[in-house]
Amino acid sequence: MMNALKTTKLTYHNYTYREALAASEKINWRVEDIIGGDKLLDFDRPFMPEALARTEQLPFLTPSEKLALNQIRGNGYLCIFGVLEEVILPFVLDHTRAQLSSDEYRVRAFLEFAGEEAKHIHLFRRFREEFEQGFGSSCAVIGPAADIAPVVLAHHPLAVALTVLAGEWMTQQHYLESVRDNQHLDPQFKSLLKHHWMEEAQHAKLDTLMVEALALGRSETEIMKGVDDYLDIGGFLDGGLKQQVEFDLESFERATGRELKENQREEFRRQQLQANRWTYLGTGMTHEKVLETLEWLSPQARRKVESISAAFC
Ligand SMILES: [Fe+2]
Ligand SMILES: [Fe+2]
């Protein structure tokens, strides 16, 4: 095929299935080790870093109201990632199953990846139970995954792989840049993010290999179709975030007993939508590793994503 991506195209990283497998085999925490029993959430402390929660940008909230909103956002964070992982799990299993008799390291690395995502889904569900017991009032979250996964998975496989890639680099950035050295956050919530991050570090590398495998042999036109579809998925998720902000506003008023004035509600919606966009879309679209992979696919792919990412920052 003319102008198709070839296996000989030089790559920009040194990720291998063998090393990803070896790294993941060294990490083996169990859900029971990091949640439940005496490992309680501390509702006197924030869960989310300010870089993602952005509650300080709502000056009409008192400190305790900002704390409540921060924890609502923390619950949303783990629940939304739980939903995204329910999209990732079948996609990775299908990708693995397509070539079961090829490279043994590939098959085993992807099966570890899938097993870890199943564990994270379990962890985040357990978290939600703990949160609901301790927070004191109900907080709705978008979903269920059964409604979201079919919509996402109906897109071009390259688009789904790019969505997964961006999602996993995103969690890396959140943890390393705003959670790891943050001494204000609840240690238990931080521990959940840390254990998740330990395994996501391998996933992001495997996603890079998955994107490359799915792109090989495809023409520039088809690659750009994958990129357009990736942006389409982003638009679909953005609609979900708008709904999430409405849920968060209701949860906030229920939890604090404060009824905001209409202009304050509008400000809450506008500002928190942008905070959610940055958390779930912008940090992925602007991540240097995601941009490198897009550039590898096609310089045009990188330019296209860069041309719209400012709206999600
Ligand atoms: Fe995960
Ligand atoms: Fe992951």
Image (cartoon, rainbow, N blue to C red):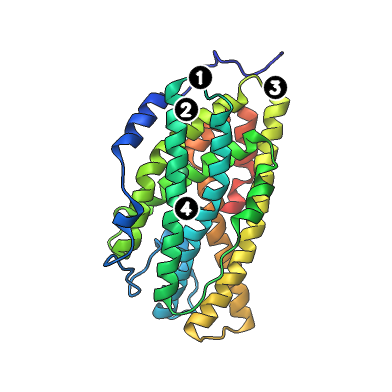
Examine the rendered structure and indicate whether residue 247 appears above or below residue 239: below
Upstream in sequence: badge 4 or badge 1: 1
Residue 281 percent across, percent down from the top left = 56, 50
Upstream in sequence: badge 4 or badge 2: 2
- The amino acid type found where label 1 is placed reads Ser
Tag nearer the camera, 1 or 3: 1
Upstream in sequence: badge 2 or badge 3: 2
Reading the image, the residue beneath label 2 is 107
Cα distance in 3D space between marks 4 and 1: 28 Å
Reading the image, the residue beneath label 4 is 121
Kindly identify the residue that appears in the image at 41 percent across and 62 percent down.
48
Q: Are marks 2 and 3 in contact (CB under 8 Å)?
A: no
Cα distance in 3D space between marks 2 and 1: 8 Å
Query: In what element is the residue under mark 4?
Result: helix
Residue 16 seen in the current view? no
Upstream in sequence: badge 3 or badge 4: 4
Query: In what element is the residue under mark 3?
Result: loop
Residue 173 percent across, percent down from the top left = 42, 47
| Quadrant of image for the N terminus | top right
Q: Residue 102, labelled with which disc? A: 1
Q: Are marks 2 and 1 in contact (CB under 8 Å)?
A: yes
- The amino acid type found where label 3 is placed reads Ser
Cα distance in 3D space between marks 4 and 2: 21 Å
Frontmost residue, 296 versus 217:
217
Frontmost residue, 109 versus 211:
109
Beta carbon at label 4 within 8 Å of ligand 1: yes
Q: Residue 219, labelled with which disc? A: 3
Locate residue 267 relative to residue 128 in the image: left or right: right
Instruction: Determine the image quadrant of residue 63.
Output: bottom left
